Image: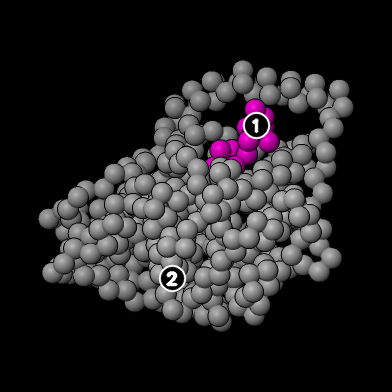
Amino acid sequence: MDGSASGGPGAGDSAPRFATLTLDRRRFLVLMGSAAAYSILRPHAALAQRIAGDVPLQSWSLPETLPANGIDAARALVGAAILAPSYWNAQPWRFEVEGAELRLTLDAARTLPGCDPDLRFAHLSLGAALENLLIAARAWGQQPSVQYLPWGPAARANSPWIAATVRWKSGEQHRDRLLFSALGERRTNPRVYDGRAITMQSRAQLSAQVPEELRVHWLEDKRDITRIAALTAEATLARANDRRAQTERYAYVRMNASEARHRGDGVTPDNLGLGGPLNGFAARALDPRSRFHHWGVESLARDVHDAVRSSGALALLTAPKRQDSSAIVAGQAYERVALTAATLGIAQQPLSAPVESPKHRDTLARAFGAAGEEPLLLVRLGHAHAPEQTPRRGVALVSTWRAS
Ligand SMILES: Cc1cc2nc3c(=O)[nH]c(=O)nc-3n(C[C@H](O)[C@H](O)[C@H](O)COP(=O)(O)O)c2cc1C
């Protein structure tokens, strides 16, 4: 096989057919006219944003030691937690702090239930934030302990929706210093990678971050990677047909870095991996109400396809059997993998599209030789220059303080 996208992993699957971009002259003029109008109006939009006021953002640098004052210490721990990755950079977390105890809760207003009906991606995001908090606590010489709370229909009845309770006390050692050093360096890298493989030693180090209750499956063969690229592109196209879900996603699309900083969340065209001079226009076309919606989604699917195909390896995180806490624990494991990758100079990007739909999820599991297991997150790995940091809503916006 020549490495082109032919043949999906499922029986009879074929690579997604991207409508060739043969724009007729009239559509081309409309497109260019809209792009020109957008660039003329953009400075005014930016000015309006400045007048409206930006949300306070979290700094990406962390203190070397835990502040002595209890409130500042808890604030530093929450500050480390919120540097975590999250689905669509929605940051669906809240922290209730009471002395040296913290409750990590789900911010239901920041979930995407149309795309993520069982909230697995929201819980993966909470798990990543929890892991950051634990790594920072250990690196700052604390001994943290975690109690996981049930996740499922019973939990939904409770408000707030508590995912875990963390307590900490002074310990004897400073642990996890290496991963701590990567908290501010880790990025999701959506770029095309240079195709270099991931060495066996690196894979072993990454796999070692996954606890026994979960599994990690690897694909490195170029033909297998190409098949998963086609599956991911197909899932990206298919999911955009659900108007409600696509509207939810589009609510987190920001047109540029300054809009993302202003809102403190969301993903830009660059974060989506959209390439080319019209990438801002393609991001706007992800709006299901856009006349160019199909073109926007096809552009995204094609760029995702090319990006996945350039990977050095793919990893699928699964649970042998679905359990209530598995998404939180998988979020913790994914974050340790992502931080370890950062320490090894390896780029990585999670890919949720093929895990989102039950149809693609089963095909994905089979392609990794994991039939019968529950896929939780697909991650592509490789080598590429790191992108810029994405914004985070500051500690004050996501935490509540109670007198102990
Ligand atoms: C559960 C989960 C699913 C994600 N799915 C995707 C995805 O499908 N595609 C993608 O480019 N990024 C994905 N991301 C990465 C987020 O977009 C990213 O974490 C967020 O934009 C913040 O950027 P950062 O990771 O560089 O800090 C996912 C992250 C999480 C935690």
Is residue 189 visible to us here? yes
What span is in magenta? Answer: 269-282
Q: Which mark is residue 223?
A: none
Instruction: Give the quadrant of the C terminus.
Output: bottom left
Q: Residue 159 at what x, y percent from top left? A: 45, 69
- Judging from the image, what secondary structure is the residue with disc 1 in? loop
Q: Residue 21 at what x, y percent from top left? A: 81, 35
Q: 180 above or below 298?
A: below
Query: Which class describes the residues within 10 Å of circle 1: few (<14), some (14-19), or many (20+)?
Result: few
149 with respect to 304 (left or right):
left
Mark-to-mark CA distance, 2 and 1: 36 Å
- Looking at the rendered structure, the kind of residue marked 1 is Gly
Is residue 290 on the magenta stretch?
no
- In the figure, residue 206 lies in which quadrant? bottom left
Q: 93 above or below 191?
A: below
Q: Which mark is residue 210?
A: 2
Which residue shows up at 42% across the image and 55% down it?
341
Please tell me which of labels 2 and 1 falls first in the chain: 2
Query: Which class describes the residues within 10 Å of circle 2: few (<14), some (14-19), or many (20+)?
Result: many
Colour scheme shown: one colour
Which residue shows up at 18% across the image and 55% down it?
66
Q: Which residue is mark 1?
A: 276
Q: Nearer the viewer, residue 112 or 331?
A: 331
